[in-house]
Image: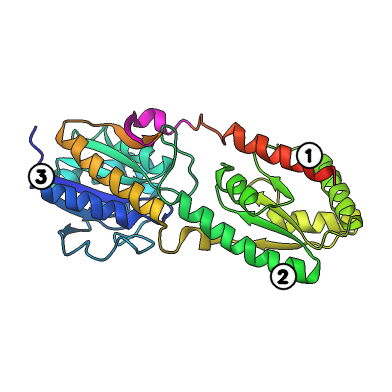
């Protein structure tokens, strides 16, 4: 089938580099003489038929911008038959031949559900700071989120050193420890608490371990102490962990939740380049007849991965990262 019109949308949590991906899709489609339609606010735009024609002028000067010019949102209606049928009806009405969705696993599940009601081609582009999509080494936004986390903790370290304080810094990542481990190692955090090194139910044991480690560090006159923790790991988060350390061991800690600043900001070069490569490849794969796949990158080579496999969450944080942190802690304990 000859593709005449492609639709693109951004869905779920925003990630730096989404605009670069939109730009790449529009530029590639223009090269192949294919129209591009952009839907606003994720799948809500599909359901409400809220869209705009995208051309070269539409994407001029956006590669360096964070967020997404198409806006984004989560869409509970895509979990319903009524919502899926409305989205499919819009695509048929607008004569869309293929749909590109930039987002994470929830967005990809939306594509898979939509396919039951619409026969057009679909391709996913991984855009999430969490880097929790199977089949690709990196997702759009991950590298920028790491840099943002590093910058934030470096500043916190300055204050921690000046006042000889203990900080517990909570990072995003949902159920993945990719951000936590990468940022923690890069910032020389004294402790990294993540899903890969800790399980819920072990809180009391971990609490005692942390208290002992902090006490030992204070005895050795360490000026500062940084604990990096993944969100959704500790019941009550960093704030509750700080309270428990005070209650059980009389250790004063300051909790700091970096929060949404990790999703914003101008994308770093790595995210701009990755987004551009994935966006162009997505259009080329559609032209070649591909569908029901995600475009990813493995060892600097672009690959296609079935959408059904991309959302399995079988891939975890690199063992080498976990081992590196364990070795660092072991070496530190000797001094």
- Residue 69 sits in quarter: bottom left
Q: Which residue is mark 2?
A: 159
Colour convention: rainbow
Question: Position of 317 compared to 329: left or right?
Answer: left
Give the percent coordinates (x, y) of residue 266: 41, 63
State the residue position of label 1.
330
Q: Which of the two labelled residues, at mark 3 and mark 1, occupies the earlier sequence position?
A: 3
Q: How many marks?
A: 3
| 311 falls in the magenta region | yes
Q: Quadrant of the N terminus?
A: top left
Give the crowd class for mark 3: few <14, some 14-19, many >=20 residues within 10 Å.
some
Crowding at dot 1, Cα within 10 Å, few <14 / some 14-19 / many 20+, comes out as few
Provide the residue span drawn in magenta: 300-312
Q: Can residue 178 be seen?
A: yes
Q: Residue 12 or 153: which is nearer the viewer?
A: 153
Q: Give whichever of 262, 91 is nearer the camera.
A: 262
- Evaluate if marks 3 and 1 touch, with contact meaning CB atoms under 8 Å apart: no
* Image position of 283 with respect to 161: above or below: above
The secondary element bearing badge 3 is classed as: loop
- Along the polypeptide, which appears first: circle 3 or circle 2? 3
CA gap between label 3 and label 1 equals: 56 Å
Residue 89 lies, in percent from the top left, at: 19, 44
At label 2, counting other C-alpha atoms closer than 10 Å, the crowd grade (few under 14, some 14-19, many 20 or more) is some
Element type at mark 1: helix
Find disc 3 in the rendering and name its residue. Answer: 32
In space, the residues marked 1 and 2 are separated at their CA atoms by 26 Å
């Amino acid at each position: 089938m000859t593709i005449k019109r492609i639709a693109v949308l951004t869905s779920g949590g925003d990630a730096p580099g989404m605009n670069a991906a939109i730009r790449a899709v529009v530029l590639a489609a223009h090269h192949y003489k294919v129209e591009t339609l952009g839907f606003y606010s994720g799948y809500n735009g599909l359901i409400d038929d809220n869209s705009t024609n995208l051309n070269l002028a539409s994407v001029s000067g956006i590669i360096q911008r964070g967020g997404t010019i198409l806006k984004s949102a989560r869409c509970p209606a895509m979990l319903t038959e009524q919502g899926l049928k409305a989205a499919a009806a819009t695509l048929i009405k607008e004569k869309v031949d293929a749909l590109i969705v930039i987002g994470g696993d929830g967005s990809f599940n939306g594509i898979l559900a939509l396919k039951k009601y619409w026969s057009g081609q679909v391709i996913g582009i991984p855009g999430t700071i969490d880097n929790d999509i199977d089949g690709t080494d990196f997702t759009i936004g991950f590298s920028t989120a790491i840099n943002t986390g590093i910058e934030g903790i470096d500043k916190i370290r300055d204050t921690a050193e000046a006042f000889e304080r203990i900080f517990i810094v909570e990072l995003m990542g949902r159920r993945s420890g990719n951000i936590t481990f990468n940022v923690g190692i890069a910032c020389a955090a004294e402790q990294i608490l993540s899903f890969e090194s800790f399980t819920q139910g072990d809180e009391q044991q971990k609490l005692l371990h942390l208290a002992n480690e902090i006490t030992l560090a204070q005895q050795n006159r360490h000026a500062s102490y940084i604990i990096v923790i993944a969100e959704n790991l500790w019941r009550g988060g960093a704030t509750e962990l700080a309270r428990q350390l005070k209650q059980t061991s009389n250790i004063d800690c300051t909790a700091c939740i970096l929060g949404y600043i990790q999703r914003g900001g101008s994308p770093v070069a790595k995210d701009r380049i990755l987004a551009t490569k994935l966006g162009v490849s997505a259009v080329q794969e559609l032209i070649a007849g591909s569908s029901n796949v995600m475009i990813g990158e493995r060892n600097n080579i672009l690959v296609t991965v079935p959408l059904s496999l991309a959302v399995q969450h079988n891939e975890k944080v690199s063992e080498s990262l976990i081992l590196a942190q364990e070795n660092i802690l072991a070496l530190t304990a000797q001094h």
